[in-house]
Amino acid sequence: MNAKIWMASAVLGVFACAAAVAQSSSKTGAQPVETVGVVHNPCAALPPEPAIVQAFMAQVDQAKAHHQSEPQASAEVNAASKAWNDKKALEDFGNLCRYRDANAALAPATSHRVVFMGDSITEFWGAGDPKLFTNDVVNRGISGQTTSQMVLRFQADVIDLHPAIVHILAGTNDIAGNTGPTSLDAIENNIAAMVDMARAHRIRVVLAALTPVARYPWRPSVDSIPTIKALNDWIKTYADKEGLTYVDYFTPLDDGHRGFKAKLANDGVHPNPAGYAVMSRLAKAAVVQAQSKTP
């Protein structure tokens, strides 16, 4: 058979099979094959949080509300949570679905809107100092994220919200290897890409130094101290060169050995309310400074 005729026949056969399946499904009441690829609402297709994980997190929230010790997750809960997060990471690597509904529900931006873009240190800031995130100051931190993931959602979670200022605190999870091996050049390029996107839309930038970490509890083999220093040195130099507002969170939180002051942190990585109070004072001053600059 001629190759062109064979190919045409094969294509027609595929369409005929698809039509037959659809007709059969309509007659039998069977559900059609799940849609993949480009869809109207990809977030609706993401896997729901497992019931066992939901129940455990409810216990955690209840313990926090009553100022009690938080329960420890069982092996079953950890396994279910990991499987769920792995599947979500595969299907929504940038986690664009996390704030999709919240972004849609936001009121129109004021002339002084500020968006805080970052990872868990930014996300938990909302609970550590909720007063900071009022008067159109918007928290768009996502726990565990690396700069490559933030670049993917920067359009949706920053630019489309039309802020006057964006505060970027990013890079510690890259150093921890949360999305695999990376390099300082890659981290720096991702930070620079976010800055470029912001400035292209006349958004002023506050660029933050990483907070101290002597050891990542979930990745103890990583030698964080010299890498954080190297990245912070680059952030300071880059901010000065580009005329960005720079905020140094490292120095006031440093225990003198390039680790996090114990009285200001929960686990050597994440600030407690006292740590966030220190950061909030610096953040407010940095935002005021950024407001005076030309976007």
Image (cartoon, rainbow, N blue to C red):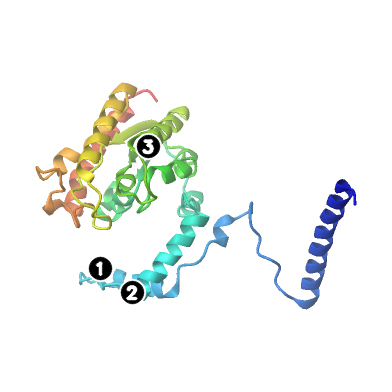
Q: Residue at x 37, y 23 (%)?
A: 294
Looking at the picture, which amino acid does disc 3 mark? Val
Q: Residue at x 38, y 37 (%)?
A: 186
Q: Secondary structure at mark 2?
A: helix
Q: Upstream in the sequence, badge 2 or badge 3?
A: 2
**On the image, numbered disc 1 is attached to which residue?**
64
**On the image, numbered disc 3 is attached to which residue?**
166
Q: Is residue 20 visible?
A: yes
Relative depth, front residue between 159 and 142: 142
Relative depth, front residue between 189 and 166: 189
Q: Residues within 10 Å of mark 1 (few under 14, many from 20)?
A: few
**On the image, numbered disc 2 is attached to which residue?**
75
Residue 139, x across and y down, in percent: 36, 48
Q: Residues within 10 Å of mark 3 (few under 14, many from 20)?
A: many
Q: Which residue is situated farthest in the left direction here?
A: 256
Looking at the picture, which amino acid does disc 1 mark? Lys
Q: Residue at x 64, y 57 (%)?
A: 36
Q: Which residue is situated farthest in the front direction here?
A: 1
Q: Which residue is situated farthest in the bottom direction here?
A: 28
Q: Residue at x 32, y 52 (%)?
A: 120
User: Would residue 228 appear left or right of 182 to someone viewing this image?
Assistant: left
Q: Is residue 108 visible?
A: no
Looking at the picture, which amino acid does disc 2 mark? Ala
Q: Secondary structure at mark 3?
A: strand
Q: Which quarter of the image is occupied by the C terminus?
A: top left
Q: Secondary structure at mark 1?
A: helix
Label 2 to label 3: alpha-carbon separation: 39 Å
Q: Upstream in the sequence, badge 1 or badge 2?
A: 1
Q: How many dots with numbers? A: 3
Relative depth, front residue between 290 and 70: 70
**What's the mark number on residue 78?**
none
Label 3 to label 1: alpha-carbon separation: 31 Å
